[in-house]
Image (cartoon, rainbow, N blue to C red):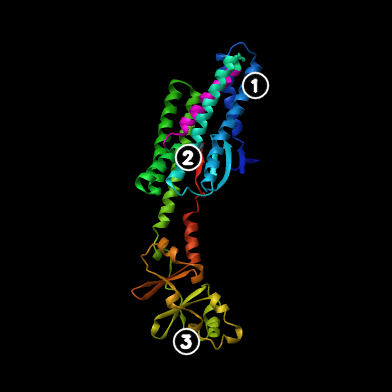
Amino acid sequence: MAENIRLGTVAGFRLGVHWSVLVILWLFTWSLASTLSDTAPGHSAPTYWIAGAVGATVLLASLLAHELTHAVVARRAGVPVSDVTLWLFGGVTRLGGEAQTAGTEFRIAVSGPVTSLALAGVFAAVAVVFRQLGVANIAVGVAWWLSGINVLLGLFNLLPGAPLDGGRVLSAYLWRRHGDKVRGQLGATRGGRIVGYALIALGLFEFMTASILSGVWTVFIGWFLLSAAQSEEHRIVTRQSLSGIRVVDAMTARPHTAPGSISVEDFIQSYVLGDRHSAYPVQGPGGAIVGLITLTQLRQVAPGERSTTLVRDAAMPIDQVVTAAPHETLTALLERLAPSRGSRALVMDRGQLVGIVTASDISRLIDVHTLEVPKGADRVL
Ligand SMILES: [Zn+2]
């Protein structure tokens, strides 16, 4: 959704509108105007068009209310909200993070459809009151139409497939039931694929038997849901695969080592200059690894003392260096790596140095695995 028009902020949320909103505005105006000319006869053609446009605009405001409820509930639960956008298929509330508990996920998801269903009740009540007061039948018709569309919106969004709200509800349910968030998310994307295929089949049936336009529209929505569910599944699986990566896959094998018995000055001249590495395991007498020296530690040796200080004295002693086993998971190592300890780990296998893992190795790996991954999950409609 690149062609977003920024509308400013509502309740502290950035609000954007995609140009495709004009398509739904026009479709709903046209659809309501033609419905009204059948159900509320006796008005001129322009009157139907005006009533249609008014109804479509109020409907857009209902969609916005649905999205803003998601956004408010998320913000209250401590999940940051990036922005709220209205577009062809309704609205998207983009979250800047994920819910921390199944209960939070459930509340954020269910709040939107609850708002739509509540609005349906309000519009139905308005229609009844209008009729009692003897207001023109066309206004009563608009109120009933708004009520009906909000019921549809609420129920449609509760279909149990991600990225629909009902998919998030399903995800929260599975998460709570199995105690596994990822399992819940994958179950919801599978639901999304099933809902997508079912809508495509329904649309094709409509296309052949009833209305061509509404059939095409249903197929289009089904296709959209299907591809959104597939890309969400891909995102989850990619993140999972990163958590399954082992230290051996991320490390630089056979790192250049530094002899501990030469001076810092000699080491800089004959090893560091012209080399691209920023950390070196230090070898003691007999070849055992006794420490780790980084460019930062080399810089801390005053220039006047470089020729008299030995590399092993400037290095971080091995008992302070983070070490890892090659087949340990990267996520387990990440929890031990702290910037205060050099953000590097030596990979040891049965007492032998086999590699080094640096912060740049890890961030490159994360970049590669998240190349096509949008941040956070979109919540659609
Ligand atoms: Zn929603």
Q: Is mark 2 within 8 Å of ligand 1?
A: yes
Q: Is residue 21 visible?
A: yes
Name the main secondary structure of what is drawn in magenta.
Answer: helix
Three-letter code, disc 3: Ser
Q: Is mark 1 within 8 Å of ligand 1?
A: no
Q: Read off the residue under disc 1.
A: 50
Q: Read off the residue under disc 2.
A: 109
> Element at badge 1?
helix
Asked if residue 75 is positioned above or below residue 328 in the image, the reply reads above
Three-letter code, disc 2: Ala
Residue interval drawn in magenta:
139-160
Q: Nearer the viewer, mark 1 or mark 3?
A: 1
Q: Read off the residue under disc 3.
A: 261
Q: Quadrant of residue 22?
A: top right
Residue 346, x across and y down, in percent: 43, 72
Residue lying at 46% horizontally and 67% vertically, measured from the top left = 337
> Element at badge 2?
helix
Q: As drawn, which residue projects farthest toward the bottom? A: 308
Badge 2 crowding class, 10 Å Cα cut-off, few under 14, some 14 to 19, many 20 or more, is: many
Counting residues from the start of the chain, the first of labels 1 and 2 encountered is 1
Q: Nearer the viewer, mark 3 or mark 2?
A: 2
Counting residues from the start of the chain, the first of labels 1 and 3 encountered is 1
Asked if residue 219 is positioned above or below residue 4 in the image, the reply reads above
Badge 3 crowding class, 10 Å Cα cut-off, few under 14, some 14 to 19, many 20 or more, is: some
Q: Residue 32 colored magenta?
A: no
Residue 348, x across and y down, in percent: 38, 72
